[in-house]
Every structure is written in C-alpha cells, then in structure tokens.
Amino acid sequence: MVVSVYGFSPEATTDIGFGLSIAVAVLGVAMGYIGLQSSKTNERIGLGVLGYATAALAAWTIIATQAFDPESAQWMVFGSGCGHITLSVAGIITHEATQTRGPRTRAR
C-alpha cells in the first residue's frame, strides 16, 4: 500500500487500499481471536493484541477510503501501510523477545 501511492493514480490507490484493507481486517480479526484463545501468554500478546490492532487499522482504512476524496484518501492509505509495517515489526520484536531458548553450545 505504501508503494501504490507513487505508482498509481489517487483513485486506483484508494481502490487498492480499500480492497487490501478488507482482507487484512479479516486476517487481523482471525489472528486476534486465535491469539486470545491461546493458553500461552506470549501468543496472547503477539497474536491477540497485535491482531486486533491490525484489524482496527484496516477498519479505519476501509472507512477512510470511502469517506474522503481520493486525493486525501491516498495519503491515508500511505499512512495505513506505514502503520501495518510498524505493527509487523512490533510482532517480530515481540516474538523474538518472548521466545525461551536454551544456551547455545558450539559443535566440536
């Protein structure tokens, strides 16, 4: 969604953002539901909270692409794409920070 702002017209960017946000919202809700049903605390944080945050951001993008004119909505799609990148990085950091690993040993 970030790159589409520079590659397509405002109308096309808005339509791309609308379509992708519908799919991302569905996946975010599914990810949040699965994460919050987990018995592991790490998965509740990583999947549950970040999944629902992703769905909320996608829902806002769906509304914004329909409520604003295409010239304004394309920049909201750009901001939404940046937000999804940020949430992805937060998910990677959360996943890596909550993994329990034993000490590494070198092979001889």
Image (cartoon, rainbow, N blue to C red):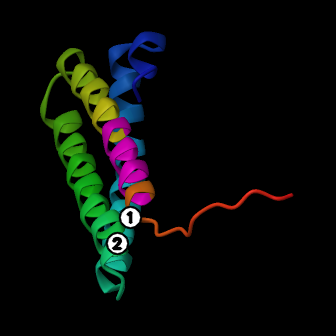
Quarter-wise, where is residue 29 in the image?
A: bottom left
In this picture, residue 100 sits left or right of residue 37:
right
Looking at the figure, which quarter contains the N terminus? top left
Mark 1 and mark 2: Cα distance apart in space: 6 Å
In this picture, is 73 found above or below 29? above
Judging from the image, what secondary structure is the residue with disc 2 in? helix
Q: Position of residue 39 (x, y in %)?
A: 35, 88
Judging from the image, what secondary structure is the residue with disc 1 in? helix
Q: Residue furthest front?
A: 108
Q: Would you say residue 87 sits in the magenta stretch?
A: yes
Residue drawn at x 32%, y 86% as measured from the top left:
37
Residue on which disc 1 sits: 98
For the residue pair 6 and 68, the one nearer the viewer reads as: 6
In this picture, is 97 found above or below 85? below
Residue drawn at x 23%, y 40% as measured from the top left:
61
Q: Would you say residue 45 sits in the magenta stretch?
A: no
Q: Position of residue 4 (x, y in %)?
A: 44, 21
Q: Residue flagged by tag 2: what amino acid is it?
A: Asn
Looking at the figure, which quarter contains the C terminus? bottom right
Q: Residue flagged by tag 1: what amino acid is it?
A: Thr
Residue on which disc 2 sits: 42
Q: Which class describes the residues within 10 Å of circle 2: few (<14), some (14-19), or many (20+)? A: some
Circles 1 and 2, Cβ within 8 Å, touching? The answer is yes
In this picture, residue 106 sits left or right of residue 87:
right
The magenta region covers 85-95
Q: Position of residue 90 (x, y in %)?
A: 33, 47
State how many labels appear.
2
Residue drawn at x 29%, y 70% as measured from the top left:
48
In this picture, is 106 found above or below 86? below
Q: Position of residue 94 (x, y in %)?
A: 35, 56
